[in-house]
Image (cartoon, rainbow, N blue to C red):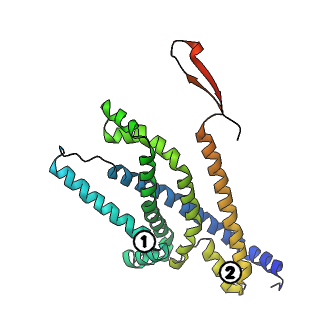
Amino acid sequence: MPQSFWGGVAFIAQKYGSLFLSGAASTLLLAVVGTAAGFLIGLLIAIVRTIPVRNTDSFFKRAGLKVLRGIFIAYIELFRSTPMMVQAVVIYYGVFPTVSADYALYVGMFIISINTGAYMAEIVRGGVLSVDKGQTEGALSIGMTHWQTMTSVVLPQAIRNILPSIGNEFVVNIKDSSVLSVISVAEVFFTAKSAAGTYMRFFESFVIACAVYFVMTFTVTRLLLWLERRMDGPKHYTIHGSQTVPEGEIKVREEAE
C-alpha cells in the first residue's frame, strides 16, 4: 500500500469505491425516507395540536384531545432531549432484539423517521402559527371544517414558510445517519470505519468520507434553493384590480435579486 497521503487515498478509493457508493446510496435513502416520514408524523401532530377546543364540545372530545396532546408532547420532549445514537441503540437492542443485521437498514429508517418527526412537529406547528389568523377565521366562517381549513388554506402557506427548515432537516439527516453505524447500518461512515480498520489508514479513509458527505449535502442544498425559487413564483405577474375592467390590471415586476 502506498505510504503517501494521496497514494493512500487513491488506493482506498479503488478498493472501497463501490462500497462507498453503496454507502452513499444507503445514506440518501435513510435521509429521504426519514425526512418524508418524519414530515408526515409532524404534520399529523401539528394538525391535532391546533384543533380548537370549545366549552360546547362533548366531554369525550375534550378529554380525547387532551390525552392525545399529552402523548404528543411527551413524544416530542423525549426524542428531542436524547441523542439519536442512544435512541438507535435502545430501539435496536430493546424494541427489535431479534432482528438480524440484514434488516438494520429498515430499523435505521424507523429510527430516523421518529426522531425527525419530533422536530418536524414543532416546525410544522410554527409554520401553522405563522399564517395570519384571519385566514383560519375566514375559512371557518364559510363552513369549512378544521381539517379542510388546514389542508386547503393554512398548510399550503405554512409549508412554503417552513420549506427552508424542512430542507435543513433533510441535510441534517444525511449527516446524522452516520450514528446508525452503532447498529451496523452500512452507510458512508460505517464504510469508512471498515476501510480504516482494514488498512489502518484512518486519515485517508475519513477524508474520502468527508468528500462523499460534502458532495451529497452540497448537491441537496443547491436543489432545495432551486425548489424555493420555483415556489416563489414567476418574476413577472399581474395583480387583477378588477374582474371587469381590464385597465384595472397592474403589471408588477419584482426587483432582481
Residue 159 place in picture, x, y as percent: 49, 46
Residue at x-position 59% and y-position 61% = 171
Residue at x-position 33% and y-position 51% = 48
Looking at the rendering, in which quadrant would you find the C terminus?
A: top right
Report the side of 44 relative to 180 (left or right).
left
Residue 15 place in picture, x, y as percent: 74, 76
Residue 213 drawn above or below residue 51: below
- The image quarter containing residue 135 is top left
- Residue 1 visible somewhere in the drawing: yes
- The image quarter containing residue 220 is bottom right
Residue at x-position 43% and y-position 64% = 114
- Residue 185 visible somewhere in the drawing: no
Q: Secondary structure at mark 1?
A: loop
Residue 244 drawn above or below residue 226: above
Residue at x-position 57% and y-position 55% = 167
Residue 179 drawn above or below residue 57: below
Report the side of 106 relative to 224 (left or right).
left
Looking at the rendering, in which quadrant would you find the N terminus?
A: bottom right
Query: Which amino acid type is shown beneath numbered disc 1?
Result: Ser
Q: Secondary structure at mark 2?
A: helix
Q: Earlier in the sequence, mark 1 or mark 2?
A: 1
Residue named by callout 2 = 195
Query: Which amino acid type is shown beneath numbered disc 2?
Result: Ala
In this view, the residue in front, 28 or 77, is: 77
Residue named by callout 1 = 81
| Residue 108: assigned label | none
Report the side of 101 relative to 231 (left or right).
left
Badge 2, how many Cα within 10 Å: few under 14, some, many 20+? Answer: many
